[in-house]
Image: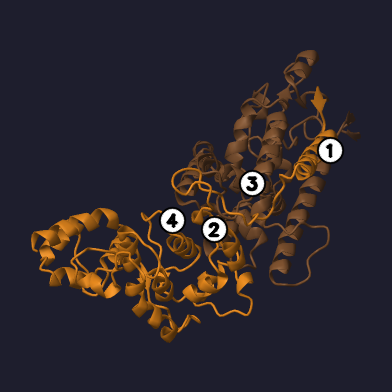
Amino acid sequence: MTLTSKPLAALVVVILFGGIFFSSAMGWWQTESTKEAAKITSGEFAGQANPADIRGSYTFGNVEKNFAVPAAVLAEAFGVKDSNLAAFTVKGLEEMYAASAQEIGTSSVRLFVAFYKGMPYDLSTDTYLPESAATILRTRTLSGEQAAYLAAHTVPNPGTAPATSAPQTAPQATQAPAAQPTPKAETPAASSTDRTVKGTTTFGDLLGWGVSQATIEKVLGTSMPAAQVTKIKDYCTEKGLNFETIRPALQAEVDKVK
Amino acid sequence: MITLFGKRIRLFRPKSIWIRKVVQWAFFILIALISVDRALAESGGVSIPFLANASLHAVCPFGGVVTIYQFATVGTFVQKVHQASFVLMIISFLLAILFGPVFCGWVCPLGTIQEFVSNWGRKLFRRRFNHFVPVKLDQVLRYLRYGVLAWVVYMTAVTGKLIFSDYDPYFALFNFWSSEVSIIGLVILGVTLGLSLFVERPWCKYACPYGAVLGITNLFRVFGIRRNVATCKADGACSIMCPMNIPVDDKTVVRDHQCISCLECTSEAVCPVAKTVQFSTRVALRGAK
């Protein structure tokens, strides 16, 4: 069988649009997210909506519908002041927090929802939350690991973003320890005194804990930055070093001088 | 026919597969309208009637390819990819199994715009056009797109994000006004269009990961470019005209992974001998022998 251009053109168009028409008739042709998060398939939370499936196109209303986290709580957590909170899209946070040193966006909402619901979340990657969100989460039930992660991944609410004001969150923060039976979350300030190497630990912290510059440079395999206030993690990123490899090595050195 | 030095000579004027241009530009306009419609809808303005409010990602079959891993392991799609991409991927595979990468040669708007720019290059450089890259280097570079494909699939699987959209000249072409487009995407688009003045379809030849996927079907497609050796005059016209620089005149069946099934080499277009280079099944070729 031989095909010339005109029949081929007709076949291409017919198969392409015919396929789309058929899939549309079968209900398979979806050009937008259904806004229904995928369900967790196994484990303790099997059958529940998976926070990791929250998309940037979700509105706070969609999140509320899927996870029963009120839009008002999300708004307070992320400092959103919008006349229609249910219609605020999650990806809008990236723009709001554009000036933040750490990215606050869709991943942050996923993390917040997971912790708020007491559900597991992949803690191997760095996702940050504003202080206002962390304050709310400290009133919830968190595992020790989650509380430690939260402490190391909280950033101040930037003044440029219309974040929830400090007076609104401060009372919750003070009530938190009494209200929750969970392990107390570490505060960011504690990171420099508990001798645990984290994403917020600076070279100054290490030197202050008694680790010599030579030892640090030996672990890094390169020289230390001139500014001691530089976060080790940021420096590793800048130098193309894997912080997750460097961190335990530095922690071992810190433990030696304890 | 003309008479020259007393001899009657038949001048051969290669025909163009004009219907392909019509189909290509129809899809180009359709995708452009879908993209504009989306932008209008997102800005709260009036959208274009009869067009689905779909993002460009939703109507790109490559989105289906990059999300296969996540779909198989987690049951979800990569960010920004929707079920429509999956449907289009399956339809494109079906087309490719039947006819080879017709999606590249007849549908892909990035191919269309490259060919459009190449028309100027052809006028500027005439015979040198599409022959600037040394053959040996060209042959090696042709496999680069499989490296790009491997990188895109791996990175998408690892990050769960549509990592390629930042580098995708197709996305940049139809969203150049949007803040979603990265600078690097615009640069790659600019470089691609610039190179199109010298080389036909440079993105398709050297970098397109989706072309790499579809190109594999040339090894087993039902309809293929077949040359009848018995009637072939071996004038090389088919090879000269091939936008992908495939030496059609030394093959009986074109199984080159770069063929885009454009039919420009066939007897319907450039080959001066009827029924010599055809787009046919194996059975048809046997019958012609």
Residue B63 is left or right of residue A127, and the answer is right
Q: Nearer the viewer, mark 1 or mark 2?
A: 2
Q: Nearer the viewer, mark 4 or mark 2?
A: 4
* Residue at mark 2: chain: A
- Pointer 4 and pointer 2 on the same chain: yes
Indicate the amino acid at tag 1.
Ala
Give the residue furthest to the left: A257
Report how far apart the C-alphas of labels 1 and 4 lie in the structure: 53 Å
Q: Which mark is residue A54?
A: 2
Color scheme of the displayed model: by chain
User: Looking at the image, is A174 positioned above or below residue B232?
Assistant: below
Rendering coords of residue B14 (x, y %): 81, 37
**Quick check: marks 1 and 2 in contact, CB under 8 Å?**
no
Q: Name which residue type carries label 4.
A: Met
Give the residue number, with chain letter if any, for mark 4: A119
Callout 1: residue from which chain?
A: A
Q: Can you give x and y, in whole percent of width and height, for residue B169 in the image?
A: 60, 55
* Alpha carbon distance from label 3 to label 1: 24 Å
Image coordinates of residue A59 in percent, x first then y, are 60, 66
Mark 1 to mark 2 CA distance (whole Å)? 41 Å
Label 3 to label 2: alpha-carbon separation: 38 Å
Q: Which residue is mark 1?
A: A10
The residues tagged by marks 4 and 2 sit, at their Cα atoms, a distance apart of 14 Å
User: Secondary structure under badge 3?
Assistant: loop
Q: What color was chain B assigned in the picture?
A: brown
Residue on which the image places disc 3:
B201
